[in-house]
Amino acid sequence: MNLRRSLCALLLSMLSALAPSGPADAIDFYEIQIYPIDTVPTGHLQLELHSNTVSTATGSDAKQALNPYQIHETLEATYGVLRYVEIGQYFCTAKLSNGQYEYAGSRSKVHFSLPMTERWPVRFGVNLELDYMRRQAEENPLSLEIRPIVESHYAKFTLIGNFAFEKPFSGPGTHRGVQFSPAGELEYELSRWIQPAVEYYGDMGALQVLPGVQRQQHFIVPAMNLYLVPQLELNLGVGIGLTRTSNGLFLKSIVGWEF
């Protein structure tokens, strides 16, 4: 009898190990942006308004992960403290599916570039971000993100890679380990004021047990960067989901002004 129970327990353990893991967490709709190497000049203040919403989601997996028709508005204030270092604060709000508009939480960041790579063909930087959100807005309200940044220029092209590693410290994601969310951008300088781009955002889930590709989130975002006046930053884009869990469209915009 004990032998039968042991064999059953072993079989269940093997099936659990072979079963596909759960879906990856959704991408961060409070902050959909690509971090460049450059920081805000010393003594300058930059204010940005991030507006993101999911317009469509097809299939039960996508609807559950993307929460369509919610509107996320985030105000970001960034100040240049040194030539290669900036600090920032985020204030996140959201209009939820029930129509209520709520404060969602805050975030703090330190963003810096590595000056020794300034003359290199490939430059490097890092963004550190501490998220402390409300439980009503985020499944994992307290987390730390480390985002290495890689940037390279060739002729009129700019290629940027962001590789975000996030560790939750509260919520159900705490025991899953480190989450990996890669992102990137290929931008072309069509003119001094207009720079079209193709952006990419993904959420691959916990590195310890990566879910299958269809359970991850991957988006391609045709975007336009407009620099109509030196102080103004304008980024507009439409995100197109590539997997079953990200099967939908989202709209994004960033409006920034440097003081």
Image: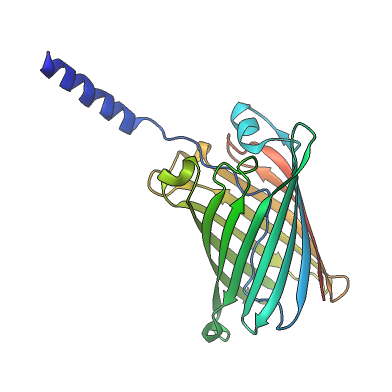
Colour approach in the figure: rainbow
Q: Position of residue 212 (x, y in %)?
A: 46, 38
Say which of 216 and 193 sits in front: 216
Quarter holding residue 19: top left
Q: Residue pushed farthest right?
A: 229
Relative placement, left or right, of 258 versus 134 is right
Q: Give the residue drawn at x 65%, y 75%.
A: 86
Quadrant in which the C terminus is drawn: bottom right
Q: Position of residue 249 (x, y in %)?
A: 72, 41
Q: Is residue 64 visible?
A: yes
Relative placement, left or right, of 22 versus 56 is left
Q: Give the residue drawn at x 26%, y 29%.
A: 14
Q: Give the residue drawn at x 21%, y 19%.
A: 8
Q: Residue pushed farthest top?
A: 1
Q: Is residue 82 above or below residue 174?
A: below
Quadrant in which the N terminus is drawn: top left
